[in-house]
């Protein structure tokens, strides 16, 4: 597997999270060795399972490139309803989770910044800039 993911959780994983995780892992495995993983430990995308404190449901998190190179990466969180990224959210409603997994895979392998309204680093910089005016 081209992902560094801890062991699957003992609690059940919902079908949307499972479909997203399986698709992303399969895509990464397929393109392993093409150089896009050079900055990751052992060439593996760091992914981790999460548990929501509110309802105990399981999710997944992994990094995507940020708006600016000096911002590095920021976490994406996948749950049964959709994908949270910075200050935005994409719902699975009307989309198969595999479709969104393929979209994020594209950002990962090309190291293309995903441009939500602003990544947390840029959002903080903009707040600082606006407070000076």
Image (cartoon, rainbow, N blue to C red):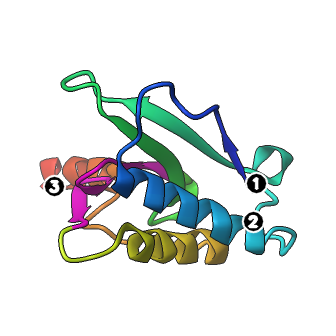
The Cα atoms of the two marked residues, 3 and 1, are separated by 44 Å
Q: Nearer the viewer, mark 3 or mark 1?
A: 1
Report, in whole angstroms, how far the alpha carbon at label 3 lies from the one at label 2.
43 Å
Magenta run includes residue 84? yes
> Range of the magenta residues?
74-92
Which of the two discs, 2 and 1, labels the residue nearer the N terminus?
1
Identify which residue is drawn at 53% across, 51% down: 63
Would residue 126 be counted in the magenta stretch?
Answer: no
Is the Cβ of the residue at disc 3 closer than 8 Å to that at disc 1? no
Residues tagged 2 and 1 counted as in contact (Cβ below 8 A): yes
Q: Which residue is mark 3?
A: 130
Query: What residue is disc 1 on?
Result: 1
Provide the secondary structure element on which disc 3 rests. Answer: helix
Report if residue 83 is visible in the image: yes
Residue occupying image coordinates x 42% and y 27%: 11
Quadrant where the N terminus lies?
bottom right
Task: Please tell me which residue lies in front, 63 or 122.
Answer: 63
Q: Quadrant of the C terminus?
A: bottom left
* 2 lies left or right of 61: right
Residue 16 occupies which quadrant of the picture?
bottom left
Query: What residue is shown at x 51% (from left), y 29% (from top)?
Result: 9
Q: Quadrant of residue 22?
A: bottom right
Q: Is residue 56 above or below residue 120?
A: above
The answer to whether 105 is drawn above or below residue 119 in the figure is below
What is the chief secondary structure element of the magenta stretch? Answer: strand
Give the secondary structure at mark 1: loop
Q: Residues within 10 Å of mark 1 (few under 14, many from 20)?
A: few
Q: Secondary structure at mark 2?
A: helix
- Picture coordinates of residue 31 (x, y %)? 76, 74
Q: Residue beneath label 2, please? A: 29
Q: Is residue 133 left or right of residue 11?
A: left
Residue 88 image offset from top left, x and y in percent: 23, 59
């Amino acid at each position: 597997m081209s992902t560094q993911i801890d062991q699957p959780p003992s609690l059940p994983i919902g079908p949307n999270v499972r479909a997203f995780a399986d698709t992303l892992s399969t895509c990464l495995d397929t393109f392993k060795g093409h150089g896009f993983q050079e900055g990751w430990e052992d060439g593996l995308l760091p992914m981790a399972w999460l548990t929501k404190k509110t309802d105990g449901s399981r999710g997944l998190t992994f990094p995507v490139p940020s708006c600016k190179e000096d911002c590095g990466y920021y976490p994406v969180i996948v749950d049964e309803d959709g994908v949270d990224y910075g200050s935005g959210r994409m719902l699975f409603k009307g989309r198969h989770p595999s479709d969104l997994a393929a979209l994020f895979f594209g950002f990962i392998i090309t190291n293309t910044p995903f441009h939500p309204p602003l990544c947390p680093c840029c959002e903080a910089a903009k707040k600082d800039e606006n407070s000076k005016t």
